Image (spheres, grey):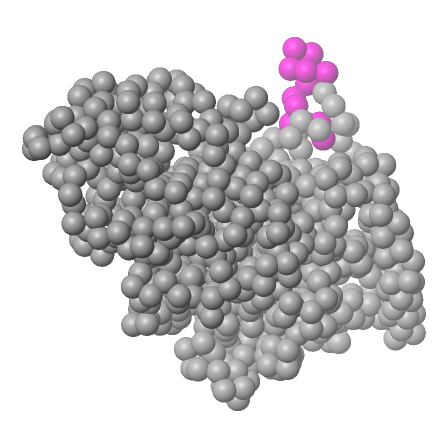
Amino acid sequence: MVTTDGACPAAMKATSNGVFQDDNPLDFALPLLILQICLVVVLTRVLAVVLKPLRQPRVIAEIVGGILLGPSALGRNTTYLNKVFPARSHTVLDTIANLGLLFFLFLVGLELDLKSVRRTGKKALCIALAGISLPFVLGIGTSFALRSTISKGVDKAPFLIFMGVAFSITAFPVLARILAELKLLTTDVGRMAMSAAAVNDVAAWILLALAIALSGSKSALVSLWVLLCGTGFVVGCTLIVPPIFRWMQQRCPEGEPVKELYVCASLVIVLAAGFITDTIGIHALFGAFVIGVLVPKEGPFAGALVEKVEDLVSGLFLPLYFVSSGLKTNIATIRGAQSWGFLVLVITTACVGKIGGTVGVSLACKLPFRESLALGFLMNTKGLVELIVLNIGKDRKVLNDQTFAIMVLMAVFTTFTTTPLVMAVYKPEKRTSNAIYKHRTIKRKDPDTQLRILACFHSTRNIPSMINLVEASRGIEKKEGLCLYAMHLMELSERSSAILMVHKARNNGIPFWNKGKRSDSDQIVVAFEAFRQLSHVSIRPMTAISAMHELYEDICGSAERKRVAMIILPFHKHQRIDGVLETTRTEFRCVNKKVLQEAPCSVGILVDRGLGGNTHVAASNVSSTITVLFFGGNDDQEALAYGARMAEHPGISLTVVRFLPSSEVSGEIVKVGSDTHDEPGNSADEIFLAEIKHKFSDSVRFEERAVRSASETVDVIMEFSKCNMFLVGRMPGGQVAATINVKSECPELGPVGNLLISPDFSTSASVLVVQQYTSRPGLGSLSTTKVAELPENEDLKLSDTDIP
């Protein structure tokens, strides 16, 4: 970096002696760098919050933040620019920024699975090639116009290649985040876009390496040597690097932390690769990216590398790259009608090339017009890789200040418009039809029809009990049997590596055995695959990737599309070794509440106390005792219907306990609260119980208990506390249930559910709390969620009021 008079700026010392010794911290490298990092991180985070309602990816906030800190906005104040970003600090700033970028490109390579690229279908491949070739050609055409006017004197061949690459890039990580936030990852458009973008990403790096090789020297022979050495580097890494990482991975078994030595060795390999490619004359970033691509994606090793590197790199170092880019971007250089005309030309040409090429080939592949248009807008997404291309071009004198500013604004415009344009033209949720969604409950006229269950889980902790519950739900070998949708609930965090979740979502709803060879040894996949083979249950894996406050939309939407009869959710608490229920995450509770309100079918919340142990129990070894506590009402009927289904399993012993008011007072009709109008002889309850008794008279044990007060009810329930699981309705009806005056800590479980999880109630039984779907507006399940809550340390209290 040179000053305006051509002299090199004085070198900065690292640290100061402090203000008390008359040292200005801003004259020293370390305190100035700390100030720069804090400034850019705070500004970009604030912009990200401001732009979040517009559904903009964080990269937009980071690019705009960098521009605002540069000469385009705040940098117009020379005092600020010379104090906070003086010319003598640029070398340190650029070095740290490029070091952070080097490791970030390693993470980007980790996220790119070449096996997925090789499996890309013909349609996605054609769309990717069209999305690269047409913009590339138009970029070269535009470069002729720019070179004859505002970019005079630049080298012809490198300029043409850089412009073509800049036009044809699609930002794979940015696109994946946009798709996740718009809930399009699992749609046809989302899958097609991700496949095409992966191909585009690989092609962009190859073209970028070519552009760098051509721009490094005026001699064609030197450029050829650079290309040959670069090719040799890639071939050598392909042969040497994967075996090294596989050796490390074999020594990092599942469930154990990855050794610090292996993480350190991996980072050294990344730095060494960067040194080699920089020595060759390509760029240090290229070596880091290649190493990331070659790291095996299966097993815990790749994930551990991401966890160790990402937060520091993405949170602190990478934002410096955006400010480094922003310092080179001066929008004031775009002056006059000609320059602004070229800005419009560049944006128009880039959009026409990328969108037009994608839409044209998509229509030729017989995709609907709206999907084709949405695909075109998605493929027009730019991001960090675009900035990398432009900055390399700027550093190598291929792009001047004016052209650089025009291209940066083009990248910001195309990415900013992607989300609103896609939302305007493509709304897949409106295409869902409810016409054939008949069975929204387990209780139905024909119990032999296929039962569809959506079982949700957050982590491997939920798997054994969830599988054992589904095993119990199989019933006998019916014609249509049981279809299980196993949905992994994953939070879409602010981390860029959330993109790793994309690979789990791409085969959403497809049976495991149709996936071919799997590259990862995912414990969840292995567990459900083993269960499928043992039980012959139709299992379809699904992944919901959303912000925690939107996760319920994915659950309810999937239930609607798959036409399931029940959603089973894990309780937001897990059992510790000492038997106490401990909160896993409070956000899970909010998800459960919203699902109870919005669900298009029945819902069950499973309080897991180790149902069947910590492993899957084979069908021949199942021996479980399940107790249904029946007070009356729709939810209790649904719980009983589910219990009846379980009773068909030869290893399940079902007991139904019906609670009735004592005969001494059964004739009195006194209303207590809003739900006590059900009389002992409720016709719906009587009819349904009679049906169950008739069908399962030999296999189900029925008991009727007359009670006078809540304390007697608790005593009766305590008699069955040794069972493996309680099945209860969320909002039971009848006079007996009305006396269980539980000040509920967890209203989503209802009074009986809260009683069963109370520390005062000693049992090791799991609890499944069931809410029956009802379509009555303002009644039933939708109206029962408004229950007063107590602080977590409030004791559960029972009313000893006699039953009327």
Query: Which residue appears farthest toward the front when viewing the image?
Result: 698
Q: Is residue 242 above or below residue 480?
A: above
- Using the image as rendered, state which of residue 459 and residue 316 is in the foreground: 459
Q: Is residue 189 left or right of residue 424?
A: right
Q: Position of residue 603 (x, y in %)?
A: 36, 49
Residue 45: say if magenta: no
Left or right of 220, for residue 145: left
Q: Is residue 172 visible?
A: no
Q: Position of residue 275 (x, y in %)?
A: 87, 51
Q: Nearer the viewer, residue 221 or 42?
A: 42
* Relative depth, front residue between 792 and 354: 792
Q: Which quadrant is home to the C terminus?
A: top left
Image position of 763 (left or right of 165): left
Q: Which residues are magenta?
A: 17-29
Residue plotted at (64% across, 30% down)? 34
Question: Residue 24: within the magenta?
Answer: yes
Instruction: Identify the residue at image location x=76%, y=46%.
Output: 301
